[in-house]
Amino acid sequence: MNLANVAVKRKRKFKVTTDSKHKLPVYPNLLNREFDVAGPDQAWVSDITYIWTHEGWLYLAVVLDLFNRQVVGWSMSNRMTRKLVIDALQMAVWRRHPVSGLIFH
């Protein structure tokens, strides 16, 4: 193969992680890409990623406070479900006890 300058093209498994065709409510974008806030617990953002471990792929949901980019809640699971994000948000609320008016993006 080296002499013929031929290489193997490996297929990568593609996993769809976004479903935009759903009937769930879609809320307005209150942040509008303004990620600088004046104080803590005014705006939190969340995202999901996946991490390879010795036990296989795990999904990690993280909630960050935009004021100082501090992790205020997180959750891990072997499945990407709405419970993953809800658990991360519940941890953040339990730890920080935010007042009314917090934006969760």
Image: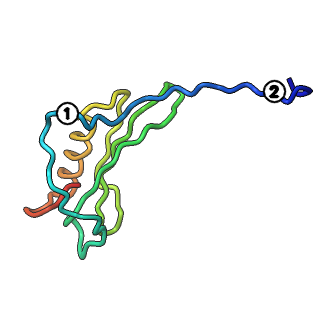
Q: Quadrant of the N terminus?
A: top right
Question: Looking at the picture, does residue 33 appear above or below residue 83?
Answer: below
- Which residue is depicted at the point 23% across and 39% down? 87
Q: Quadrant of the C terminus?
A: bottom left
The quadrant holding residue 98 is: bottom left
Name the residue at the bottom extreme: 38
The quadrant holding residue 29 is: bottom left
Taking the image as shown, residue 1 lies to the left or right of residue 89, namely right
The location of residue 4, given as percent across then percent down, is 88, 26
Name the residue at the right extreme: 3
Residue under label 2, please give it: 6
Name the residue at the left extreme: 100
Say which element carries label 2. Answer: loop
Q: Nearer the viewer, residue 17 or 104?
A: 17
Q: CA distance from mark 1 to mark 2?
A: 44 Å
The location of residue 16, given as percent across then percent down, is 39, 31
Taking the image as shown, residue 81 lies to the left or right of residue 17, namely left
Say which element carries label 1. Answer: loop
**Which disc, if any, is residue 74?**
none
- Which residue is depicted at the point 36% across and 43% down? 48
Give the amino acid type for the residue marked by disc 1 in the picture.
His
Question: Looking at the picture, does residue 98 appear above or below residue 94?
Answer: below
The location of residue 96, given as percent across then percent down, is 20, 58
Q: Nearer the viewer, residue 43 or 98?
A: 43
- Which residue is depicted at the point 22% across and 47% down? 89
Question: Looking at the picture, does residue 75 appear above or below residue 27?
Answer: above
Residue under label 1, please give it: 22
The crowding category of the residue bearing disc 1, from other C-alpha atoms within 10 Å (few below 14, some 14 to 19, many at least 20), is few
The crowding category of the residue bearing disc 2, from other C-alpha atoms within 10 Å (few below 14, some 14 to 19, many at least 20), is few
- Which residue is depicted at the point 49% across and 26% down? 56
Q: Earlier in the sequence, mark 1 or mark 2?
A: 2
Give the amino acid type for the residue marked by disc 2 in the picture.
Val
